[in-house]
Image: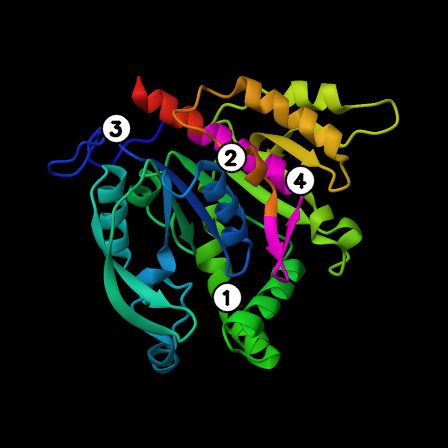
Amino acid sequence: MAMSPLGLRNKGGIGSTRARRPIMLGVVGDSAAGKTTLTRGIENIFGQDRVNSICTDDYHRYDREARKKVQLTPLNPECNYMDIMEQHLALMAMGEPILKPVYNHNHGTLDAPEVFEPADYVVIEGLLGFWTKGMRDCFDVKVFLDPPEDLRRAWKIKRDCTKRNYTPDEVIADMQKREPDSKEFIEPQREYADIVVRFIPPGGNLDSDPTKYNVRLVLRPTLPHPYLAEIAAETRTPRYEPIRFHLARDRGKPVDVLEIDGQVPPEVSAAAEEIIWDKMAHPDGELNREAIGVFVDANQERRSESLALTQLLIVFQLVGAASAAAR
């Protein structure tokens, strides 16, 4: 269980009536790694009245035009107010409100700051959330998204062209410019994550159905996962093993690995989900089970069984952290 950098817990702001400090989830990954899709589902599971989120992209030091002049990418810590970001994370971890900067992705501008008050659960997503130890110490659960590079590039081209008014050539040129910074600043944060998530198109086919993506989860021993062996055993048949659990090493360190077949039948996924629900600490509020695994694809709401299980594993950890903090 992480504590705030000041060693405080169960604290709110001045005059606050909060029963305890908020539970903090950090989700880090390169641009278009799937952070928003993962976190939006988690927010919907808890409900908008109990969770709110913040994007560390808001701490960019320069707007889009200024970045071109200084020749820095947003992936470089020098392009961001890292000291303010770390201070704000520490304040939020104690339940304190902050005056948060705002970066407008649609226009590439720095807009007026806004007040942000932490809810029971706070989701922080972005490029550099695990960059310093002080920042990492603010989180109860740390997740790193690590999709195959060709998939991430396809996601980025699609997103930036449809939502951020770029042309495909502009997006490709920008990715090439960012590649050295991605390796120097984003990739090293992977080693600090409790959970590393990799969605993989079956057969490497980028045109495959996104609801059928396989997922590989690297689960470090910094968090407990008491359901892994049972899930693998209960969902296995003599001819088909849709959910596989094994011990491995990740960059020389021992880890658990959970692999989920994107083609896992809904009834098998439901059985695995029920095991996790049964082992979950009693939540302090209702959870929306129907929101698990749901995402929007081309303005259409769809469901992925592998995404559902991934989100539920993270929810399990957040609920457990809340239970421990309440004791």
Using a 10 Å C-alpha cutoff, classify the residue at mark 1 as few (fewer than 14 neighbours), some (14 to 19) or many (20 or more): few
Using a 10 Å C-alpha cutoff, classify the residue at mark 4 as few (fewer than 14 neighbours), some (14 to 19) or many (20 or more): many
Using a 10 Å C-alpha cutoff, classify the residue at mark 3 as few (fewer than 14 neighbours), some (14 to 19) or many (20 or more): some
Mark positioned earlier in the residue sequence (3 or 4): 3
In the displayed structure, 292 sits above or below 87; it is above
Label 4's element? Answer: helix
Residue 305: give x, y in percent of width and height: 68, 39
Q: What whole-number distance in Å separates the C-alpha atoms at marks 1 and 4?
A: 31 Å
Mark positioned earlier in the residue sequence (1 or 2): 1
Q: Which residue is mark 1?
A: 180
Residue 179: give x, y in percent of width and height: 53, 66
Nearer the viewer's eye, disc 4 or disc 2?
2
Residue drawn where x is 49% and y is 69% of the image: 178
Residue drawn where x is 48% and y is 31% of the image: 287
Residue 101 located within the stretch drawn in magenta: no
Task: Find residue 62 and report its image quarter.
Answer: bottom left
For the residues labelled 1 and 4, say whether their Cβ atoms are less than 8 Å apart. Answer: no
Q: What whole-number distance in Å separates the C-alpha atoms at marks 3 and 4?
A: 32 Å
Residue 73: give x, y in percent of width and height: 42, 70
In the displayed structure, 306 sits above or below 148; it is above
Nearer the viewer's eye, disc 1 or disc 2?
2
Q: Give the side of residue 312 with respect to residue 142, left or right.
A: right
